[in-house]
Structures are given as structure tokens and as C-alpha cells.
Amino acid sequence: NAGVTQTPKFQVLKTGQSMTLQCAQDMNHNSMYWYRQDPGMGLRLIYYSASEGTTDKGEVPNGYNVSRLNKREFSLRLESAAPSQTSVYFCASSRVLQETQYFGPGTRLLVL
Amino acid sequence: EDQVTQSPEALRLQEGESSSLNCSYTVSGLRGLFWYRQDPGKGPEFLFTLYSAGEEKEKERLKATLTKKESFLHITAPKPEDSATYLCAVHTTSGSRLTFGEGTQLTVNP
């Protein structure tokens, strides 16, 4: 089992460009999450999906959209990237909400 | 508002020098407390889940304990490979998301 996988590993964007971060899990988990990690701020939840077909805002959703494509895949889209979105993005999954979350390796995003 | 505070921010130990990391929390109702390890450039790796005061869990040189206001991660006779950032997070009865602390960066020198 690969667990949680994320693509790409690293990306450089110019301000105003758009991109989609991909996440997939092979653990048959129902719930999936997107976090960003910034120095001095810890891990902050952007969006989550309790189950296939549902998505909800987390702590810092502005500037992002998500799609729960199917039970395995959960994507994060930046429609118009801003320098403030420079961060490391982690996807996670859990069997159900509030159970142990398992994280992917992260995507490092630099917005110039 | 739920809060999680980890201390110290950074800790430097000699190999074999045991110590403890602290995670204190202020929450409306605790549903679970989680410890993760994060290596540079990697995602957080799950270590332990604790659910109630008095609970303890062990894995190799690590032991996690929980009281009503804080959790400790005890590291016994650490090795250089234990160097990492250790993150604490809580699930509460009032919400559906994890609240993370900022972590303790542990360095173990040979």
C-alpha cells in the first residue's frame, strides 16, 4: 500500500496562475483533508471531506477550492495564486472523521 | 477557542539523555490526543492516540501519557535517529477538525 500520495512534489507559480494539487489514498478511508504548514503557524486545515460527495471549509479556506472526485481522490485548486499561498501543502485521510489521520509527503508551492 | 501549546520549542539532547516533551491543551471536551513525528521535508507520521486521562502508550523509546490538561512524550535513551519535530494535536467534542500545536524540534547529538 502506498498510503497517501500527492502530486506534484514541488511547484513554482507566478502570481495569478492557477493549479491543482492532487491527492489519492489507497486505504479505503472515507474522510480526506487538505492542510497548509507555515513556519510559526503550525498545520492549518483548509478544507475537508467527511465522505464521498461532501466537502466543508476548514480554518483557512479563502483562495482555495476542492473536489472530492471519488472515494480515493481529493484535489485542491488555486484559481489565482498569490504570494501568501506559498506554503507546504499536506493531504491526509482517516477512516472516518475524528479518527487517526494519515498524511501524504506534501507539495511545496512557491508563488512568485 | 481550542488551544494546544507545545514546549519547549526546541530541545537538544545528547545520545542516551532521556527527557520529556510537553503538550498542554485547553479545549471544551477532549475526544482524542494525537502525537506525530515529522522529519524535514516529509509529512507527519502517526505515533500515538490517547483518549482518556491516565492512558499510556509505548513504542520503542517513546512513551506518551495523558492527564486532564496535558500530555507528555517521554523519550528514553534517545538516539540520533530520533531527531525530528514532534507534533501534538487534539480532537474535541465541539468540532470535527484536529487542532495542532506548533511542535517541538528535537535534536539528538551522537
Image: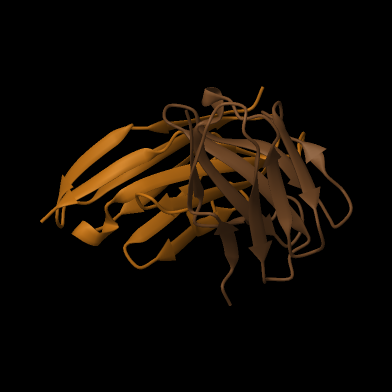
Chain colours: A brown, B orange
Would residue A99 be visible to someone looking at this image? yes
In this rendering, position of residue A52 left or right of residue B49:
right
Would residue B68 be visible to someone looking at this image? no
In this rendering, position of residue A1 left or right of residue B79:
right
How many circles with numbers are drawn on the protein? 0
Q: Position of residue B66 (x, y in %)?
A: 51, 46
In this rendering, position of residue B102 left or right of residue B74:
right
Residue at 47% in and 53% down: B43
In the image, farthest residue toward the right = A53
**Which image quarter is the N terminus of chain A in?**
bottom right
Q: Foreground residue, B82 or B30?
A: B82
In the image, farthest residue toward the bottom = A1
Among the 4 quarters of the image, the one containing residue B30: top right
Among the 4 quarters of the image, the one containing residue B76: bottom left
Q: Position of residue A79 (x, y in %)?
A: 70, 34
Q: Is residue B77 above or below residue A20?
A: below
Q: Position of residue B25 (x, y in %)?
A: 55, 32
